[in-house]
Amino acid sequence: MALILGIESSCDESAAAVTEGPHEVLASIVATQDELHQPYAGVVPEIASRAHLQRVPMVVDQALQQAGCTLQDLDAIAVGHAPGLIGSLLVGVSAAKTLAWSIDRPLLGVHHLLAHVHAPALNDVPIEFPAIGLLASGGHTAILSQTDPLHANRLGRTIDDAVGEAFDKAAITLGLGWPGGPAVEKLAADGDPSAVKLPIASLDGPDLNCSFSGLKTALLYATRGQPEGRGRHATFPRTAEDLTHQARADLAASFQHAAIEALIRALDQACVRVNARSLVGGGGVLANTLLRQRLEELADRHDVTLRLPPQRFCIDNAAMIAGLGAHMLAAGRTSGLDLQALARMPVEA
């Protein structure tokens, strides 16, 4: 089995990993940047890219040490080159190019989103195809149809915020800080998901698209009341801090229910349209307990095998990059040293 070093720097995690083939993870190191971005309640691209400059060399060294190998033992270098924050991607891509050139090994440009839906196969058996994939993260939300690990068609997406971003904004509305997903889930545990009726986002049409803008607005008004005035001059009669703990918990639970139900309804339609053998999930929002439970119910209803990554492989990580890179190497899909970092890239590419 090929020994692959993976590098990931698409957003605010600096990560490196070593896999043996597409499944066996020998080392996985992730350096988060939460402490750098918390004061701004979101990822600041310039801060993220500067932090990657400091941390990518460090995590590469740690991954090699953990795996018990040297650069010369490697068979290829894989890097997430798209999509993501362009400044952050450039750091990882530049590091991977330098390493591949210095040890004369193949370079593998990996699609970050396809890597996320490969994550359930890490330290586990291969995914059975065809498969329906749910990608749910802070920056991307999409429903995919896959015939193999390297090819996918997008069946649907959100037309505005990704579901992870919607959770972040809900947390701000409720006065919970950032990152929002874990904070909303924790508060929702004390709440009643049927206490507040919030809209479940869906759009008519052949694509399985949805929107979370109406849900976010409904949560804002339910939390702070109807605004007086318009635009920048609008004022609200209250803040989240004026509500009781139970009222905020009910709002968090109701929001979580509506956001997740929108994904489940779209996936339910996908399962009707596609004769799949597996239902696969990837991305940071897959760490949400309620979402995982609802996916289990959906898989049972449609008699498909559910494949979800363990918690540590839900967030951005380099093991998924290296693992998918091993599939690329086996298929002869290597990249040249002119590999570009791309902020946007369709999964069909």
Image (tube, helix red, strand yellow):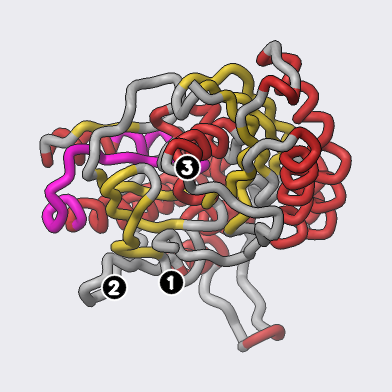
Q: Report whether 267 appears left or right of 19.
A: left
Amino acid type, mark 3: Met
First in sequence: mark 2 vs mark 3: 2
- The part of the chain drawn in magenta is 270-293
Mark 1–mark 2 distance (CA, rounded to whole Å): 10 Å
Residue carrying label 3: 328
Q: Which mark is residue 159?
A: 1
| Residue 242 in sight | no
Q: Residue furthest front?
A: 104
Q: Secondary structure at mark 2?
A: loop
Q: Report whether 97 appears left or right of 55.
A: left
Whether residue 272 is in magenta: the answer is yes
Mark 2–mark 3 distance (CA, rounded to whole Å): 35 Å
Instruction: From the top left corner, tell me how far across and down residue 24 is, in percent.
Output: 48, 20
Q: Which mark is residue 203?
A: 2
| Residue 318 in sight | yes
- Pointer 2 local density, CA inside 10 Å: few below 14, some 14–19, many at least 20: few
Q: Residue at x 11, y 35 (%)?
A: 303
- Nearest to the observer: residue 345 or residue 11: 345
Whether residue 128 is in magenta: the answer is no
Q: Quadrant of residue 58?
A: top right
